[in-house]
Amino acid sequence: MLAAVARVRLTQLLGHVMSSLSAPVARRALSYLPRPFVRVIRGVLDSRRMTAVTTAVVGTLAIALLAGIAFGFARAQIMREEFAKLNVVAAEVLERSERSSAQVRAAIAELQAHDTAPCSPKSVALMAELNLKYGQLQGVGYVANNRLMCSSYGRHGDGVLLPAPTSQHTARGPLQLRKASLSLASSVGPQPVIMVTSAANGYTAIVSPTLAIDVDTKDPDVALGTVLYSSNEVRMSRGKFNPDWRGRLGDGQHAEFVKDDRIVSLWRSPRYDYFAFASIPADAANARIHQAGVLLMSCAACAMVVLLFLTGRSARKALPLSDAIREGLRRREFYLVYQPVVELNTGRWVGAEALLRWRRSTGEHVRPDIFIPVAEDCHLIEEITDQVFELAAADLAGFFEKYPDFHVAINLSASEMQSPDVVPRLKNFIARVTGARARNFAFEATERSLIKPDQARPILAEIRGMGSTVAIDDFGTGYSSLSYLQTLGTDYLKIDKSFVDAIDTASVKNHVVAHIIGLAKDLRLQLIAEGVETAEQARYLSDRGVEYAQGWHFARAMAIDELADSLNRQAA
Ligand code: C2E
Ligand code: CA
Ligand code: CA
C-alpha cells in the first residue's frame, strides 16, 4: 500500500519536474523550427502531449548522457586497475634489477679494494666469500684476455674461453658484458649467465639473466624485462619489448599507456642506465569494458522504457477531459445503449431513449453526466451529437421496418436547441436512417434550452411539423412553469427522477409529483416518469394516469441487439 502511494507520488513528482523542465525547453525548441512545420506539430500534438513528448525526448537524452558519463567512469576505473597491476610488476622488476646491479658493483669494488693478486689463493677465497655475501650473484671471478681465469669456484687452469663482450659506459667506468654458458658448478649449470666485467681491472660478477625478471605475475600473458635507456637495447626480458615504447618515457621516471592493443607500464631507474617494462594484451581489459558497457546500456534501456511508460501514462492521465473527448471522438470510443420506455397500463415497450456511453482506450468508463457538461462548455457538444446521429443511424438501419410504431428518443443539449441549424441537422439525420420516418424519433430538450421562448417556439413547431415529437427532459428541475410550456408546444414532459424518488416518502416533493401530474393532465401533456425503481412507484404513477415510465424497475439501458431480441420476444 505504502509502496503504491510512494510510486504514485514519485510518478507525479517526476511528471511535475519533467514537465516544468520540458515545457520551456519545448517552447524554445519550437522557436528554432520553421513556422509551417511548427503549425503541423501543434496540430498533431496538443500542449500536454507536446510536453510529454519533450519530457520523453529530454529524459531519454539525459539518460543516454548519464549512461555515457557512467561508461566513461567505468572504463577509466577498469584501466586504472589494469595499470595499477602492471605498475606493481614493472616496479618489482626494476627493484630486483637495481638490487643485483648494486651487488655487481659492490662485489667488483670489494675485489679491487683488497688489492690481492688476481687468482691468488687469497683472492679466490675472497671471491667465494663475496659469492656467499651477495645473494643476487651466481659467482664472482677474474677475466683476462677474454678468458675466465678463476672464480668463486676456484682456478680454471688456462682459463675458460668466453664470447666477445659488448661494452657499456657507466659513471664508474666502462663495463664489458657477456652472455656465456659456463657450467662451473651445480649452481651455475649450462644455462647462460650474464658476466659483467670491469674493463679497468678484469674483476667480474656473474648473474642470472632471469633472476630479476622472475616475478610471479600469475598472468602468463605478461611481458616484462629491463631495457638499456641510452641504447634502447633489451637487457633481459620475458616476452616481447616494442622499441617504440621508450619514446613515451621521455625524460620522465614513469609512463603508462596503451599502444597497439597492449597496456604498458615503464619505470626508469634513477641510478642505472635502464628502465623496467611490464605489458599485457588489452583484450582482457577490453572485454571488461565491453561487459560494463553492455550492463550500462541495458540499465539505460530499462530506464528509458520506464520513463517512456511513465510519461505516456501521465500524459494520458493529465490530458484535460476536453482533449480526451476530442480524442475519444476521433478514436470512436463512444457507443449507444437504449433504455426502454414502457407504457404503464399495458407494460408494452413503446420506445427507447438513446443514451451515450464512453469507454476510453484505458478501459475506463466515463459517465455522461461528467463528459456531457464538459463537452457543452468546450463547444464539443455538436460533434458529440453528430456522433450520436452516426451511431444511431448505424444501429437503427432497417429497425423501424420491423417495428414501425416504435420510437427512439435522442437527447439534444440547450445550445443545440437554440441554434438555427438544428432542424436541418435533424432532418438530415432522419434521412440517413434506413427505413425510418420522422415519427420514429423523439427529441429531448432540457428546460434550460427553452428559457428564450420566442426563439424556442418556432424550432419546436418545426420539429413537430416534421412529424417527430418533442419531450421536455428533467422537468421540475429548471425554471419554467407549466403554463408557459403549454404555449411552446411539446408532446411529453419527463418527470425528473428526484420527484419519482420522493413518491414513497413523506417529503414535500411527494406533493409536487401529484401537483405536476394534475397540471400536465389539465394541459393535455403526456407524462414520462424517469428513474422508476420500484413497483410501488410504478403503481402510484399508473394510478394517477401517468402514461409512460422508464427505469431500472422495467429495464436498464441495453445494446440495440438486445433491445431487438426483447421486442421480438414480446411480439411473440
Ligand atoms: P437523462 O437524459 O435524464 O437520462 C436518464 C439517466 O438516468 C440515464 O443516465 C439513465 O441511465 C439513468 N436512469 C434510467 N433509469 C434509472 C433508474 O431507475 N435509476 C437510476 N439511478 N438511474 C436511471 P445516464 O445514461 O448516465 O445519462 C445521464 C445524462 O447524460 C442524461 O440524463 C443526459 O442528460 C445525458 N446524456 C446521456 N446521453 C446523452 C446524449 O446522447 N446526448 C446528450 N446531449 N446528453 C446525453
Ligand atoms: Ca433524456
Ligand atoms: Ca432526465
Image (cartoon, rainbow, N blue to C red):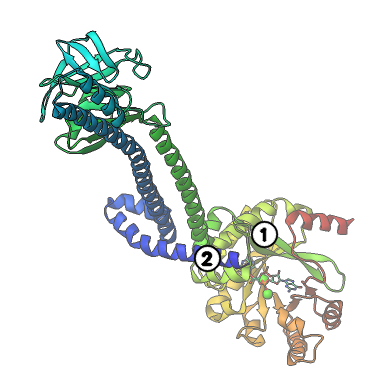
The kind of residue on which mark 2 rests is: Leu
- Residue corresponding to mark 2: 321
> Does the residue tagged 1 have its C-beta within 8 Å of any atom of ligand 1?
yes
- Figure quarter occupied by ligand 1: bottom right
Residue 501: quarter of image: bottom right
Residue 221: quarter of image: top left
First in sequence: mark 2 vs mark 1:
2
Q: Judging from the image, what secondary structure is the residue with disc 2 in?
A: helix
Residue extending farthest to the right is 572
Q: Nearer the viewer, residue 15 or 368?
A: 15
- Give the image location of residue 18, x and y in percent: 41, 61
Residue 339: quarter of image: bottom right
Relative horizontal placement of residue 217, taking residue 512 as reference (left or right)? left
Quadrant of image for the C terminus: bottom right
Q: Is residue 105 visible?
A: yes
Q: Is disc 2 surrounded by few (<14), some (14 to 19) or many (20+) residues within 10 Å?
A: some
Rendered image: mark on residue 336: 1
Q: Residue 241, relative to residue 513: is it above or below?
A: above
Q: Judging from the image, what secondary structure is the residue with disc 1 in?
A: strand
